[in-house]
Image: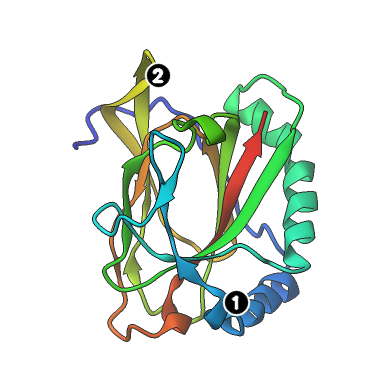
Amino acid sequence: MSNNGAPQTPVVIFDEFLVAQEWRSLLDFTLNQVSGFAATQVIGGDGNSRLDHNYRRSRVLFDLGHFHQLFAERLLTFLPHVLARLNYPWFPVTQMEVQLTATNNGEYFRVHTDNDAGEVSGRALTFVYFFYRQPRSFTGGELMIYDTARNNNHATALGPYRAVSPLQNQVAFFDSGCLHEIVPVGCPSGDFADSRFTVNGWFHR
């Protein structure tokens, strides 16, 4: 898809989301949890999760220990500013999902929305926090967020998009109904520690 014209979909980005000690501790935690990561799955139209390596390849950790509370509190603090900058109506947050994803050599996530299936239809806003070991040992992994039209709950990419590079200690927020993808990561070492890491998740209305 070409980026014809300026994208209209707002994306809010904050640098230095965590203080240095926090993200370094998060990285140490992540590298010590390698055995707890599992292959990511996709949620089908029937609401059931399944492996689909043609559509998504990465690994995920659902138990973030005390970092779950750290992110939940920090994200809720940022939420009023995010809603204002997205021009998104205020809503009561009924649930927050927070998970940790590792994407390594040749891995990706094809174009999708985050709230099509019934059990996740309450997802309103998506957040993606980037971190990795320095010096960075991967390339690619950009988050592409497409201008999206919806018709009878069917999402169509209109063409223009925002490309968000995975930069250290940066977080991005956008509407969960927007089509987006993670382009393939190049990580020649294949070492888990050299992965593109994210803490990502959703605010539910």
Q: Which residue is drawn at 75% across and 51% down?
A: 72
Q: Is 32 placed above or below 3 here?
A: below
Q: Which residue is drawn at 61% across and 62% down?
A: 62
Q: Is mark 1 on a helix, strand or loop?
A: helix
Q: Is 149 placed above or below 17 here?
A: above
Q: Mark 1 points at which residue?
A: 30
Q: How many marks?
A: 2
Q: Name the residue under label 2.
A: 153
Q: Where is residue 32 in the image (x, y as percent from the top left)?
A: 61, 85
Residues packed near mark 2 inside 10 Å, few (<14), some (14 to 19) or many (20 plus)? few
Q: Is residue 171 visible?
A: no
Mark pair 1, 2: CA separation: 36 Å
Q: What residue type is labelled 2?
A: Asn
Q: Residue furthest top?
A: 152
Q: Is mark 2 on a helix, strand or loop?
A: loop
Pick whichever, 16 or 196, lies toward us: 196
